[in-house]
Amino acid sequence: MSVTALAVQGHRLIQIGVALFLFTSFQGFAVPYFAAPNLGRSVHTLSGFTGVLLVAVGLVWPKLKLTLMPSRLSIPRLQRSPVS
């Protein structure tokens, strides 16, 4: 797979991670108002860790030596179909 395609995929993973992390930040303000605040806090923590993980994977992604098939299997929705 070309280096630019892996870079685009890595950039998309970073974008998703930052968006999830921002969502988690706003979600933290609502945790005290949940019916079960402990459950809300655990979801808040899990979302934060997942956002950080996606950012970390996005930073490492372009450095991986993936061929075409593993790259498409790992992130299939980010592939652009050729226009005929």
Image (tube, rainbow, N blue to C red):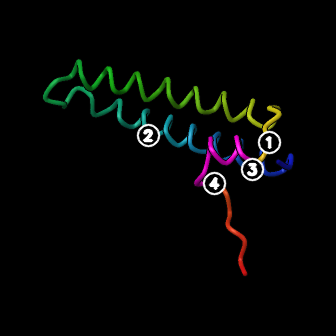
Label drawn at residue 78: 4
Residue plotted at (63% across, 54% down): 78
Other residues around mark 1 within 10 Å, as few (<14) / some (14–19) / many (≥20): few
Which stretch appears magenta? 69-78
Q: How far apart are marks 1 and 2 (CA)?
A: 33 Å
Residue plotted at (83% across, 34% down): 65
Asked if 8 appears above or below 36 in the picture, the reply is: below
Dot 1 or dot 3: first in sequence order is 3
Amino acid carrying label 1: it is Thr
Amino acid carrying label 3: it is Val
Dot 1 or dot 2: first in sequence order is 2
Say which residue label 3 marks: 8
Amino acid carrying label 2: it is Phe
Q: Does the magenta stretch include residue 75?
A: yes
Residue 55 at x, y percent in the picture? 63, 32
Is 41 in front, or is 69? 69
User: Mark 4 touching mark 1, by CB under 8 A?
Assistant: no
Which is the main secondary structure of the residues drawn in magenta? Answer: helix
Dot 4 or dot 1: first in sequence order is 1
Q: Distance between the residues labelled 1 and 3?
A: 15 Å
Say which residue label 1 marks: 67
Dot 4 or dot 2: first in sequence order is 2
Say which residue label 2 marks: 23
Helix, strand or loop status at disc 3: helix
**Which of labels 2 and 3 is toward the front?**
3
Amino acid carrying label 4: it is Leu
User: Mark 1 touching mark 3, by CB under 8 A?
Assistant: no
Label drawn at residue 58: none
Residue plotted at (57% across, 39% down): 18
